[in-house]
Image (cartoon, rainbow, N blue to C red):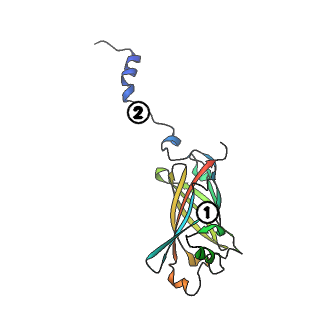
Amino acid sequence: MRRLPLLAVIVALAPALTFVPAPSRLDPHVPPAGTWQLDPQRSVVEFTVTKLGFADVTGRFLDFAGTVRYDAVQPEHSSVEWIVKVASVRTDAANRDRSLQAPEYFDAARHPELSFRSTRVSALDAGRLQVEGAITIRGTRRPLTLIATPIAGGFETRFELDRYDFGVVGGRVMSRLVGRTVRIHLRAIAHREDT
């Protein structure tokens, strides 16, 4: 039996070989390591509450900033900070937007910002991250754990809060008409600080 030269065997097998990229390139949605600044034009800070038991009201904050320090190889070295200006809330109703600034809601005069700061980040499956930290609303700080899912250019998360936990109660009438549970949607699209 004639022996094929080693080079010929490699060339013959090459189409069947699978190239496995470096771990940071396995998922094109997982961003590379570095320090990232939120892009407010593409990021989203959105909330939804149920009014009168059946009608959803959705609002957004338009003025916010944040920094994500991300290390795909050692996620525990990652961190997240997000600061939101209360006065930038928009719900498609100017009167409601003004009411949300009042003392019975966000009390914007005394507490002009909402914030989230991470204390621990750990890796889950499929590029997801568990982000533990604290959220501060109306001067009240509470622990919060998020699950961040990678998307093109950043991460996305959804979670719920009880607005009463932060003193966002509303007046005597509206406190009974608006649900206590607030559904939050954050989409963090960012650009690298070092590029």
Q: Say which element carries label 1.
A: loop
Residue at far right of view: 110
Q: Which residue matches tag 1?
A: 62
Q: Secondary structure at mark 2?
A: loop
Specify the quadrant of the image occupied by residue 88: bottom right
Check disc 2 and report the residue beneath it. Answer: 18
In space, the residues marked 1 and 2 are separated at their CA atoms by 46 Å
User: In the rendering, at what x and y percent does residue 51 appear?
Assistant: 49, 78
Instruction: Locate residue 48, reporting x and y percent.
Output: 51, 70
Which numbered disc, 1 or 2, marks the residue closer to the eye?
A: 1
Q: Residue at x 53, y 68 (%)?
A: 47
Q: Is residue 160 toward the left or the right of residue 83 in the image?
A: left
Relative to 63, 182 lies left or right = left
* Residue 69 spot, x, y in % from top left: 63, 51
Identify whether 188 is placed above or below 29: below
Mark 1 crowdedness (10 Å alpha carbons): few <14, some 14-19, many ≥20: some
Query: In the rendered view, does 32 fall on the left or right side of 6?
Result: right
**Which corner quadrant holds the N terminus?**
top left
Residue 99 image offset from top left, x and y in percent? 62, 78
Between 40 and 151, the one lying in front of the other is 40
Which of the 4 image quadrants contains residue 89?
bottom right
Q: Residue at x 59, y 48 (%)?
A: 71
Counting residues from the N terminus, which is met first, the one under dot 1 or under dot 2? 2
In the picture as drawn, the residue positioned furthest to the bottom comes out as 172
**Are the residues at dot 1 and dot 2 in contact (C-beta closer than 8 Å)?**
no
**Type of residue at label 2?**
Thr
**Quick one: 33 or 194, which is closer to the camera?**
194
Residue for point 48% across, 37% down:
21
In terms of depth relative to the viewer, which is nearer, 81 or 142?
81
Amino acid at pointer 1: Leu
